[in-house]
Amino acid sequence: MPELAIRTTDIPGLLVIDLVLNGDARGWFKENWQRAKMTDLGLPDFAPVQNNMSFNTATGVTRGLHAEPWDKLVSIAHGRVFGAWVDLRTGEGFGRVVTVELGPETAVFVPRGVANGYQTLVDDTVYSYLVNDHWSPQSRGSYSYLNLADEAAAIAWPIPLASATISEADAGHPRLAQARPVPPKRTVIIGAGGQLGRALDELLPDAVGLDLPDFDLTRQDVVDAVDWSGVGTIINASAYTAVDLAETPEGRRAAWAANVDGVARLCRVAAEHRITLVHVSTDYVFDGTAEEHDEDEPFAPLGVYGQTKAAADILVGQLARHYIVRTSWVIGAGKNFVRTMVELAARGVSPTVVDDQYGRLTFTTDLAAGIVHLLASDAPFGTYNLSNTGPVQSWAQIAAAVFALCGRSPDDITPTTTDAYAAGKLVSPRPVHSALKLDKLLATGFTPLPAADRLAAYLATITP
């Protein structure tokens, strides 16, 4: 008894599926699309939304070659065809050809950007295909085409094209040298002007950056105005981060609007357009009782900011395609704790710094690189802790290290307690322990540099 099987081809992502035909004297039955079984064997969970069928009355009907802006699963309901596919995606595989003869027992998964064509081998052939976007007249503008007779592709059609039935439109498609390469799906960075957003922009120069004041996640009309078609990844590097002001009535509303309502809008966009959403989270979702936090620790936020970030994590976690990247004590371009200590050291100030909160710094250089790594390596979707490596330190210990690197005595830092520092001030409660366990991240093949190494390199790039 044959078994369902999936075979790779010379075109990356183009897969041949050997289907099982259960037949008797009456005919046959097959599972043409069976999500659970096929995805277990490696077929992408491509979420089809439309089924199209093409009836071809005669042998020799030849259609294509069209690279459409969606993935498709092609199969034969009746008859046989000679199928041909040409990779029109940008990259070294551009122009690569694969051909397969298809009957009811065979299907092919065709990824976006690979041109699809076929020639019927018998009369009354019914060609069927599932696609994961709705066709519209406007979508034709996103197609890329290749001529069936292209000499570079040199497809060995069983029936000579001079004897085949071809539409005027298909006969007029361009040769490979003039074909429009299909670019990869775009990456959009939300919060592109922030510390992390700027670091991501350096690593992803082709990404589209969105930020205030033009892009406001708290406004549905602004989110709806963006053309999300052709977007493959959204990286949400934005957040309301005024931790102490979030404890005020106005700040509480602003924090929930940006960190929860805004993220909910991104989740709806991601679900509708099958976009991978990368969302940056925080150690503030925990109460800090554990000395180090793993990804599975239950939420127990102490303040409003942490509550909004925990709520957003729950929303993002419902998406099939998501990465929640949880981080702590972020340092990058712009205002931050290290830069403040550098400025105080230069001015001759000897500050008092909290010595009973413990964690690790996260430099945006490593945070951005870790996010890009997760995406590029196709790491399993889910939550990953990401900070720099090295010993756990208090804020006062970090401040002392900064002073030493600036030529000041570490003894010029006066340690204090959180309670003493917060006396008489509007201060949100903070977790005592913020260090994150990195085992899950390290298992993907990414190891951030020690925080001490990054600190020294960071100070060399800034002036007080």
Image (spheres, rainbow, N blue to C red):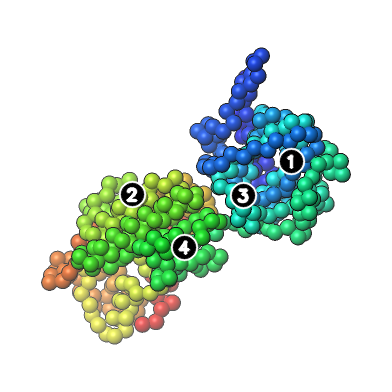
- Residue 92: image location, x then y, percent: 69, 55
Could you tell me which secondary element the residue under label 4 belongs to?
loop
CB of mark 2 within 8 Å of CB of mark 1? no
Give amino acid for label 4.
Ala
How many labels were placed on the picture?
Answer: 4
In front of the other: label 1 or label 3?
1
Query: Counting other residues with Cα less than 10 Å from the Cα at mark 2, is it few (<14), some (14-19), or many (20 or more)?
Result: few
Question: Quadrant of the image for the C terminus?
Answer: bottom left
- The residue shown at (44%, 60%) is 224
Query: Counting other residues with Cα less than 10 Å from the Cα at mark 1, is it few (<14), some (14-19), or many (20 or more)?
Result: many
- The residue shown at (43%, 61%) is 223
> Which of the two labelled residues, at mark 1 and mark 3, occupies the earlier sequence position?
3
CB of mark 4 within 8 Å of CB of mark 1? no
> Which of the two labelled residues, at mark 3 and mark 4, occupies the earlier sequence position?
3
CB of mark 3 within 8 Å of CB of mark 2? no
Furthest toward the top, the residue is 25
> How far is the residue under mark 3 from the one under mark 2?
31 Å
- The residue shown at (62%, 29%) is 19
Query: Mark 1 highlights which residue?
Result: 118
Query: Mark 2 highlights which residue?
Result: 314
> Which of the two labelled residues, at mark 4 and mark 1, occupies the earlier sequence position?
1
Give amino acid for label 1.
Tyr
Q: Is residue 423 left or right of residue 187?
A: left
Query: Mark 4 highlights which residue?
Result: 225
Give amino acid for label 3.
Arg
Could you tell me which secondary element the residue under label 2 belongs to?
helix
- Residue 35: image location, x then y, percent: 52, 35
> Which of the two labelled residues, at mark 2 and mark 1, occupies the earlier sequence position?
1
